[in-house]
Image (spheres, rainbow, N blue to C red):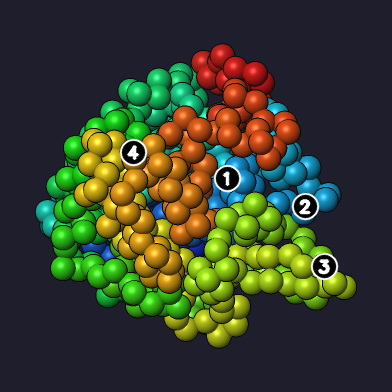
Amino acid sequence: MKRISYLFIYVGLLLFTACEDLIDVGYPSNQLGTPQAFEDVQTANAALANLYTQVRDRSVLTGGSYIGTGSLCGAYADELDCYYYDQNQYMDIYQNQQQETNIAIASVWSASYQQIYYANAVIYGVEQSTTLSDDDRNRIKGEALLVRSLLYFYLQQLFGDIPYTTSLDYEYNRTIGKTEASVLLTQLEKDMMEAVTLLEDDYRDAERIYPNRKAAQLLLARICLLREDWLLAEQTAKNILQSPLYQYEADINEVFHKSGKHILWQLKPQNNGDATSEAAFYFFTGSAPNNYILTANLVGSFADNDLRKQVWIAEVTVNGQSWYRPYKYKNRENNANEYSIVFRLEEAYFIMAEALARQNKVDEALPYLNASRERAGLIPLTSLSQEAFIDELLAEKRREFFTESGHRFLDLKRWGRLNELSALKPDWKDYKQVWPIPRNELLLNPNLYPQNTGY
């Protein structure tokens, strides 16, 4: 893990927040992580705002990004075909040929740990503050815990056993070893339970650009699925679904509009009118694609009368050849109604469906699976066996969440079905369920050895 000094973080705070509409506050009077930076709520909010800026601009959480799980995991699985002819790192990931020298994978690791370090600095700052109110201290710490845990969640799913640290001590961090996956997931569950107690249900901004307690509960429910705690996953998802804050969006055309009551958390573009990262990243027209397109296998999985195929996918035809690109976010100019969604209510429906099915309560689970089908204009499913239900759940979730947050990769991995990719991807091997630890990180910290099997 790279060293990030307090001075670097403070300078970064000035650079990032100076042009931000995210929050209008002053700047810390001293380095982040010291009491002076958290002596009032404005400077503390500024520090937290910079963390969100980093997450929005360059992180695994960014939907339309070179290192975002939406694109990398979509190409690694079976959602996206890659057209980066001169960028071997992305093509290698798409072809499941990644090695420990892959630049994109190294960027995922380093950017995530930089943001984790920053989140740790925010947490340390509010814990040491003697002037913040209890409400502000709890809110800021809870939000930073959520962001940190979400980053750790993705790192664990991508790399397997990884370092877990809450420390700002450089000498400690640069020699820390890996934490076994089950131990890490137990710790993340504990962290998210703490975040749930610290955060409130009420949003601190009407546009839901900051996470609340329910966002923390959604991540907690994800972790419960991984830990096979079906009952807690069910209870946590039910808590979200019963909240008066949310309402299932019945109009397929409104799902990716920022004002929806189904949105738990979304990221605001830097400037008013800016496109979301997704709208800009996947766009092409009038020529061959230059980064990613949707796979024929994914497009073919939609029925012709599925409204998602009609509204969320765009066909581009050039010289008689057709390609299909994601079209969930549509505004590339003068964007007034789209922010990048991190969590939406539909995921809680699928978590509930999965948790119930795992407990062999298929009849109870069906309405939660059918919600997305009925909105898409499809006939609801009835009377399925547990095995058939799981097949339909995975297929339906793929159609609902394609190119969003790596859901397809995460789902296949959680169900032990990643090897099904071998039918479409000739270079797939079982050990590729995790990526290699970047070589530079191994050279910097020998305690990260052994390298993941196969690399």
First along the sequence among labels 1 and 2? 1
Is 196 placed left or right of 68 in the picture?
A: left
Q: What residue type is labelled 2?
A: Tyr
First along the sequence among labels 3 and 4? 3
First along the sequence among labels 1 and 4? 1
In the rendered image, residue 99, in percent from the top left (x then y), is placed at 70, 29
Q: Which amino acid does label 4 sit on?
A: Gln
Instruction: Report the Cα–Cα distance between label 3 and label 4.
Output: 41 Å
Quarter that holds the C terminus:
top right
In the rendered image, residue 396, in percent from the top left (x then y), is placed at 45, 54
* Mark toward the viewer: 3 or 1: 3
Q: Residue at x 50, y 68 (%)?
A: 306
Q: Residue at x 73, y 51 (%)?
A: 82
Label 3 environment density (alpha carbons within 10 Å; few <14, some 14–19, many ≥20)? few
Which residue has dot 4 on it? 386
Label ID, residue 84:
2
Which residue has dot 1 on it? 73
Label 4 environment density (alpha carbons within 10 Å; few <14, some 14–19, many ≥20)? some
Which residue has dot 3 on it? 321
